[in-house]
Amino acid sequence: MKTFILLPVLALLFASCSNSDTTSDPVADLTTQTNMVAQSDWSITRFTDSGNDETSDFTGYKFQFNADGTFVATSSEATFKGTWVLGVGETKPDDSGDDATDDKFNKLTITVAGNKQMEHLSHKWLAEKITATEIWLRDDNVASNELLRFGK
């Protein structure tokens, strides 16, 4: 009977130990993500503001996140220039009173002006996902229900 109880306890102990107990290097991860963002033209595949789908407001725009930190938005009508920076998420909770679980996300800050569309983009975004083909961003204020997604 003791063996019967001891086996599940030992199995649970071994299962809780893993080879992936090492932490990844946030600076290396940030460098990799920065390089993915700065590799070519992007378009907006989804933009919602207050839950309203406003993706069509960005039809015809192309976006460049240049390695020197400049941000360029181009359409057939105009070109807008600004800046961007990708930073490591906070190590302490934010003081905004919003969802503290979002503090682990890196922050992608876009600063650009010129029209309504650019004003919507100019923001400090939580970087939920960055790959070679997708950038998923959201506002840290869950009540705003703002999402921004870039794709290739």
Image: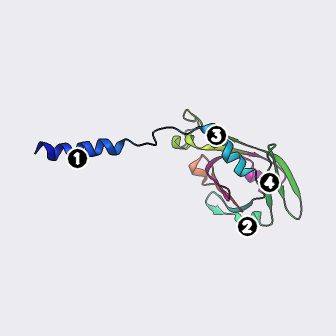
Q: Earlier in the sequence, mark 3 or mark 2?
A: 3
Distance of mark 2 from mark 4, alpha carbons?
Answer: 19 Å
For disc 3, the marked residue is 28
* Residue 112 belongs to magenta span: yes
**Residue found at the far top of this picture:** 92
Question: Mark 3 or mark 2, which is nearer to you?
Answer: 3
The residue shown at (89%, 63%) is: 77
Amino acid on which disc 1 is placed: Pro
Lower sequence index among marks 1 and 4: 1
Q: Position of residue 137 (x, y in %)?
A: 64, 52
Q: Which residues are magenta?
A: 110-136
Residue 64 image label: 4
Residue 123 in the figure: left or right of residue 96:
right
- How far apart marks 3 and 2 lie (CA) works out to 35 Å
Q: Are marks 1 and 2 in contact (CB under 8 Å)?
A: no
Percent across and percent down for residue 26 are: 60, 38
Residue drawn at x 35%, y 43% is: 16
Q: Quadrant of the N terminus?
A: top left
| Circle 1 residues within 10 Å: few <14, some 14–19, many ≥20 | few
